[in-house]
Structures are given as C-alpha cells and as structure tokens.
Amino acid sequence: MLAEKRIDVELIEERYWEPSTEFLRRNPAGKVPVLKIDGMNLSDSQAICEYLEETVPDPALMPADPATRAEVRRLIAWFDDKFHHEVTRNLVYERVNKKIMRGGYPDGRSVKAGAANIKFHLRYMEWLLDHRRWLAGDRMSLADFTAAAHLSCLDYISDVDWNLSPSVKDWYATMKSRPAFRSILADQIPGFIQPPHYANLDF
C-alpha cells in the first residue's frame, strides 16, 4: 500500500519473536507491522492502512460508497482472520516461520489441513471474481492487496495450485504486474530459494 501511494519507506527487519526493548516501546503487543510516520508509531496493519488512506487519499484504495466500503472491510477481515487461521498459519508458519524461529519441524497435520483449506478459499475467490471485476467490487481496493499479500507468501513456497482457478490466477497476475509489487517479487527469504515462477508475471 505504501508503494501504491508512492510513499518512500525504510524497511527494517524485526525479529518479533525476540522483541527488543525498543520495539516493545513502539508496540507493547510485540507484533509487526509497526510504521513510524508523522511522529507516531502506528501498529496493526488495518489501522495503518486506514490512516494512510485518510492522509494520502490518492490513489483511493477504499470506495466512497458505504456499502462497498463495508464489503472491503469484510474481505480484509476474511483474509486476515479466516484465511490466515485456516491457510497461512498452517502452511507458511509451519514451513517457513518454524525454521526461521528454530521452532522444530513442520506439523504434518497442520500442513495437510492448510493444503485442503486453500482449495475452498480459491473457489470462494473465484466466485467473487465471477460476479465482480475485483474482489470487493468494480475497483481495486485494500481487499485485493490483503488477499494478494497472503497469496504472495504462499506462492513463494509453491503452495498455490494456480490450475485450480484460472480467474484467480489472472487476478493475481494483474496484482503482480503493478509497480507496487516489484519490491515484493524481489524478496528473498534466507534459507528458502525463490521458485522460478514467483517473480514471473507470465506464470
């Protein structure tokens, strides 16, 4: 969202599982992300995004219509809560976070559950895109960026079967092609080799 709104930012890696005193001063909850901006320390991705939308309204990533705005917020909650709990946590946390945090081996049952659950979510996204141009309506919104963020993490570890839904694949290809996504597609996670298709816009 920062890149989409052309806001320059310095990214700082924070090992939140080994929180420093300085980090806890910025966010006593000990969670990322934290954004230092305008003399404030903002925490929680939704609070940060809403602040940026209100202070940097162009380009708009929240619709003006109250009903559509509510739908955007519903889908943000869907991906950051339900999708995260059923898919991201079971796949990314087990395969990646545990290794980085030295938390042991992946739990096979969790990985199996995540692999099964993502199929349901892809079908739901396909249904949304069959009825709308974007996930929440006729215009790209924060709902699309939220969903793309989760799928980007999963795609990095090749846990998305794009053959299950051509419409979702086309939508994600459009998201990947945005200039704001360039830095994300250039990400490298220590200990994990980026798959060849990850940064390929014609995957």
Image (cartoon, rainbow, N blue to C red):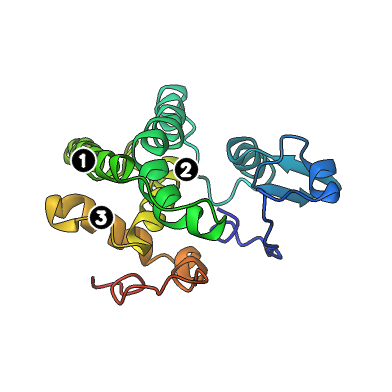
User: Toward which corner of the image does residue 40 lie, by quadrant?
Assistant: top right
Q: Amino acid at mark 2?
A: Leu
Residue shown at 50% from the left, 38% from the top: 62
Front residue of 61/43: it is: 43
CA gap, disc 2 and disc 3: 21 Å
Residue 144 in percent (x, y) is at 39, 46
Front position in the image: 176 or 79:
79
Query: Which labelled disc corresponds to residue 116?
Result: 1
Q: Amino acid at mark 3?
A: Val
Q: Nearer the viewer, mark 2 or mark 3?
A: 3
Residue 147 position in % (x across, y down): 38, 45
Q: Tell me how far mark 2 sits from mark 1, CA to CA.
A: 26 Å
Q: Residue furthest bottom?
A: 196
Which residue is under mark 3?
160
Name the residue beneath numbered marker 2. 142
Q: Which residue shows up at 22% across the image and 58% down it?
A: 170
Identify the secondary structure beneath mark 1. helix
Numbered disc 3: secondary structure: loop
Q: Where residue 132 sits: x, y (%)?
A: 24, 39
- Callout 1, which amino acid? Ala
Specify whether 124 is left or right of 44: left
Q: Is residue 122 above or below residue 77?
A: below
